Image (spheres, grey):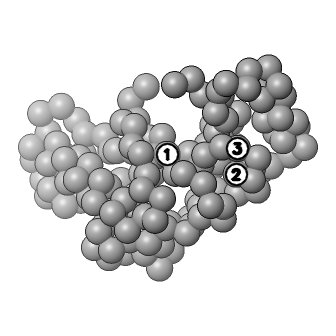
């Protein structure tokens, strides 16, 4: 499947972004259109994915790095998702970094960049998709 991606981590919708999205459809109507906004929030153990551009795309894309940048606010499998549109959700990036061979320090703190912490982050991020009503599709964030 080929997809048009109008933006990656934009910080605000403009008329130009809407026009770009509409023009993509005119150029090649066989491709789905998405956009990766940088406006999601994680509060009260809820992922709030709300951006006006999502009204103009076929599916929602999100880069999700919870637990790498900030701690979980509860059990990952009990996380909630709140989207401002009724469209499929694609997790376009997720994960955490580690230093190769770093097996020292606490395995539950991001500051130590251990391989064990990285493994735990991946496991927890996949668990957090269970409650999502649109059942997100994941793609590793290493492209």
Instruction: Please report whichever mark, 3 or 1, sits nearer to the chain's N-terminal start.
Output: 3
Tell me where residue 100 sits by quadrant.
Answer: top left
Which residue was labeled with disc 2? 54
In the rendered view, would you say 135 is above or below 23? below
Q: Residue at x 14, y 58 (%)?
A: 106
Q: Which part of the image, by quadrant, shows the C terminus?
A: top left
Q: Mark 3 and mark 1: span between their CA atoms?
A: 12 Å
Q: Residue at x 59, y 48 (%)?
A: 60
* Residue 88 percent coordinates (x, y): 54, 51
Tell me where residue 110 sits by quadrant.
Answer: bottom left
User: Label 3: few (<14), some or many (≥20) within 10 Å?
Assistant: many
Q: Report helix, strand or loop for mark 2.
A: helix
* Residue 122 percent coordinates (x, y): 26, 49
Can you tell which mark lies on residue 129?
A: none
Q: Residue furthest front?
A: 30
Which residue was labeled with disc 1? 90
* Residue 55 percent coordinates (x, y): 75, 53
In the rendered view, would you say 99 is above or below 106? above
Which residue was labeled with disc 3? 57
User: Label 2: few (<14), some or many (≥20) within 10 Å?
Assistant: many
Residue in front for this viewpoint, 112 or 1: 1
Q: Residue at x 19, y 61 (%)?
A: 108
Q: Residue furthest left?
A: 103
In the rendered view, would you say 73 is above or below 14? below
Q: Report helix, strand or loop for mark 3.
A: loop
């Amino acid at each position: 499947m080929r997809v048009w991606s109008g933006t990656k981590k934009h910080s605000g919708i403009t008329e130009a972004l809407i026009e770009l999205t509409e023009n993509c459809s005119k150029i090649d109507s066989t491709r789905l259109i998405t956009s990766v906004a940088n406006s999601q929030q994680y509060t009260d153990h809820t992922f709030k994915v709300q951006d006006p551009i999502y009204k103009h795309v076929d599916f929602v894309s999100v880069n999700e790095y919870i637990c790498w940048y900030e701690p979980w606010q509860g059990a990952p499998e009990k996380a909630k998702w709140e989207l401002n549109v009724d469209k499929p959700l694609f997790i376009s990036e997720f994960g955490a970094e580690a230093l190769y061979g770093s097996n020292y320090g606490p395995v539950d703190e991001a500051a130590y960049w251990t391989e064990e912490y990285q493994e735990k982050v991946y496991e927890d991020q996949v668990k957090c998709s269970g409650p999502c009503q649109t059942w997100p599709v994941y793609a590793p964030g290493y492209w």
